[in-house]
Every structure is written in structure tokens, then in C-alpha cells.
Amino acid sequence: MQLLLTNRLSATQRIKMRARLSLLLIVFCPAVTVGQMDPVAESSWLIFKNVTVIDMKGRLPKSGMTVVIHGNRIVATGSSSVIRTISIPKNALTIDGHQKFLLPAFWDMHAHLGTEDFDKNSYLPLFIANGVTSIRIMDGEPEYHQWRKEIENGSLIGPRMFIASRVVGFSALSNISEAGAREEVKRAKKEGADFVKVHDSVPRQSYFALIEEAKRLNLPVEGHVPTSISAAEASAAGQKSIEHSTGLDEAKLDESKAKVLSALFTMNRTWLCPTLIMRNNYATLDNQALARDPRLKYVKSSWRNRWLRMTKAAADLPSAEWSKRKEMIRKEKLLVGRMQQSGVGILAGTDDANPYSMVGFGLHDEMAMLVEAGLTPLQALRAATLNPAKFFDKLDSLGTIEKGKLADLVLLDANPLTDIRNTKRISAVVVNGRYFSPAALKKILADVESAAK
């Protein structure tokens, strides 16, 4: 798939800023509107002018701002009327951000890609089209490590990847022995995994052996709470994240238990990735409107057909079953809101292999559901920006808009702080300094739609 994008990121083009801010006016090339901008730019300079910046640092949005990018780094931010920089070449790409909102690009902290009929050249760019420039892949496959290298060297368009081990406690690796668990951790380290993923069926002693070996090799352990232990034990053992609120059933039903567990998570720095979109969709499969979602045209055929069959089959289940499921998701959302209020770190993730949780698009659905759960729009945005960067100890380079950070940005046509659904109103995306215009994003979507057929 051919996509229009800048080639401004080669190592030979990157230089460091050598000037400091003063009170002189910027002298840039004439600004044009985003919709008129050619997505291919020869310049290694990218400037957003007159834009409202939501920097994710907790400050109020600032309008009339200028953000200067050179290579793949933000080199200056400030008021458009007073910022000063070194001489900008005439071919600098300048974007008029009037009445638009610039914020850090999004992360999907629970992604699955699969290998069956997965066209990396189509579906990985679909994350970019939705402003998702980083993903945590929760099932490590050898192909993914090669894809990550291709993304890093610029030969493949896609998000930054943080890749799990092969899943321990699922399928062939369920009921694993203590020795086997230790060997899986060693294999994960050898294969270059960023963390060890645990699933439901890890025996109790094997789980603690896995934790011990992972600590020895400096690999985080993330994933489900195995049925053999409690969420409190997983937190105390040092499991870094808990997915889908597994192991939290009692806390969903008892507010006092929720408070105790929230305090424990906060003390142990245990993160929660609730994937509410996935949980909600399973609880509402009886809603036949799901099968009419226009975004299904972007979903690969094997997933789409499976989801449609599930929705059709849902009509055979009694209404009491669906009422029970909806009540459980209501309590789950309530728990997520309480944990946020208690200081537990929340991560936005989609579990996109599951019904109607769609690559790229699902992250926006997840942020909306986090707001339904009681988070403010800012907290929901942080769950998809600042929090993931903090989780991976990448706050020195990602997660906020400030000088020195990598240029992973999304430009919106409306304010997401007043309505979280405005995250869907994407005007442009910047990925590691590469600018994707509206035309380039539209091209991605058209290509993905064609591939999905």
C-alpha cells in the first residue's frame, strides 16, 4: 500500500536546536490551512501555528500557541506572538491550527494483531489513521519483532510497539510447571519481549516461580490474574498491570473490598487496564445495531464474520442472561471510577480481537466508556497518553507536549475536554515527526476498506 507521508526523519537530517527563547516575533513561511497541505514535505521542519495546546500536564489548554518540530523532536513551544527560534528554512511545513486542538497522540494499551489474514501494510496504518501511535501488544509473535524493526527504520507505517512474551497460562502454555514457567521467562528475554504476559491457567506455584524469574531478568509481568491466586496476591507479588478487571469480582460487588484493593494497588503501583469496550460489547451482543456499525467495513473479514455470527446467535439467549451481563458491566464501570478516584493508575486499552472492538477506532470508544465510568475527559485522555508513557518509563520522551519530547501528536477539530467523543474528529497526525495530512489519513482508510473486502 502506498501512503503519502514525509521523509523528514532520516538520521542525516536531524540536528539540534542551538538557540534560546526571547521576545521576538516568529518569521515563518506563509501559513496554509491543514486541508490544503500536501502530505509530502521535503523540509525537516514542521510548525503548528495559532493552535490550542492540551499538553496533558494538567494545565488549562492554551490557545494561540506555536509548536515547532525539527526532525522527530519538539524543539520549541510557546505563544505564537513571542516565541523565538533559530532561522527556519523557507520550505518549512507550516500548519494553521486556528480553532484546532493539538495533544499527544494516543496509545492502545491492550492490542492484539493476530497473524491470520492480517495485512500489516493495511491494518497497522489503521492505528495511525485513528491517532494511535503506540500500542502494547498482549501476545508476542516472532513476526511482530520484525514488524517493529520495519516501523523503526521507516519501511513500514505503524505505531510504536511494546511486545509481550508468548502468553503463559493459555492454550499450549496452560497448567505450566514451575520449571516450565521459568523457561518461558528466559525465552521471552531471549526473544526480545518487553514483558511477560500471564493468562488464567497458570498454577499457583508456577506463577510465583515466573514472578521470581522475571524479577531476576528484569522483565515486568502483566496480564490476567490467574484463577489460582487473588488480585491482592498478584499486586503484592509485583504484577505490573491487571487486564479486564480479572480477579476483581468481589470488589465489583462490595464497596469496602474495593477500597481495600484500591489502596493496595496504589501502594504497589499496580495498574488497571479495564478494556471496558470489550467487556461492554460482550454484555450487549444482543444489540443487533452492532452488526450495522459502518466501521465494520474496516475490519478484516475473519474478525467481522465471526462477530456477526456471535450477534446473530445472541438472539437465542434469554433476556434474563443479557440483563445479568449488563448489570455486571455497570458494576465494573463503577469499580473503575472508584479506583481512579483512589489513585489507581488507569490505562486505556481495547482488546481489539474481540467483538466490535475495532483496530484504532476502539480506543476512542474506550475513552468514552472511561468517562461513562466516572473519569473526567482529562483523566480519560491521560489514560491514553500520559499514563502509558509513565507505565513504560517513557515520560522523558512521550506522553506530553513539551520541548525535547518525540513528536507523536494528534490534531483535532474540536475540544475533547468538553466532549470526549471529539477525539474522533482527527484533522492530522504526527508520528515520530512524520506529518499525515487529512488526505493521507483518508487514503489509509480507503486502502484498509479495500483490503477488508
Image (cartoon, rainbow, N blue to C red):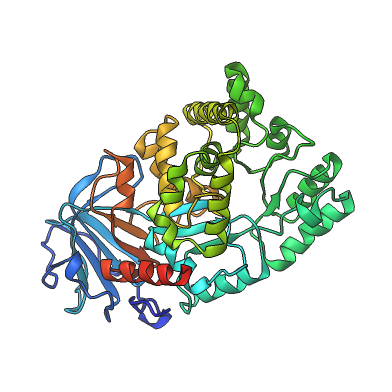
Task: Tell me the quadrant of the picture where the N terminus can be found.
Answer: bottom left
250 horizontally vs 123: left or right:
right
> Which residue shows up at 34% across the image and 39% down it?
58
Q: Position of residue 41 (x, y in %)?
A: 27, 78
Q: Is residue 6 above or below residue 22?
A: below
Image position of 427 with respect to 324: above or below: below
- In percent of width and height, residue 132 lies at 42, 57
The x and y percentages for residue 273 are 55, 42
**Horizontal relation, residue 45 to residue 205: left or right:** left
Q: Position of residue 388 (x, y in %)?
A: 50, 49
Residue at the (56%, 68%) spot, across then down: 118
Judge left or right: residue 22 versus residue 136.
left
Q: Can the viewer see residue 72 in this picture?
A: no
Residue at (23% x, 66% y) in the render? 47
* Residue 178 visible at all: yes
Q: Quadrant of residue 8?
A: bottom left
Foreground of the two, 152 or 204: 204
Q: Is residue 10 above or below residue 341?
A: below
Count of numbered circles on the image? 0
Instruction: Tell me where residue 40 sits by quadrant.
Output: bottom left
User: Considering depth in this image, is 88 or 248 the residue closer to the camera?
Assistant: 248
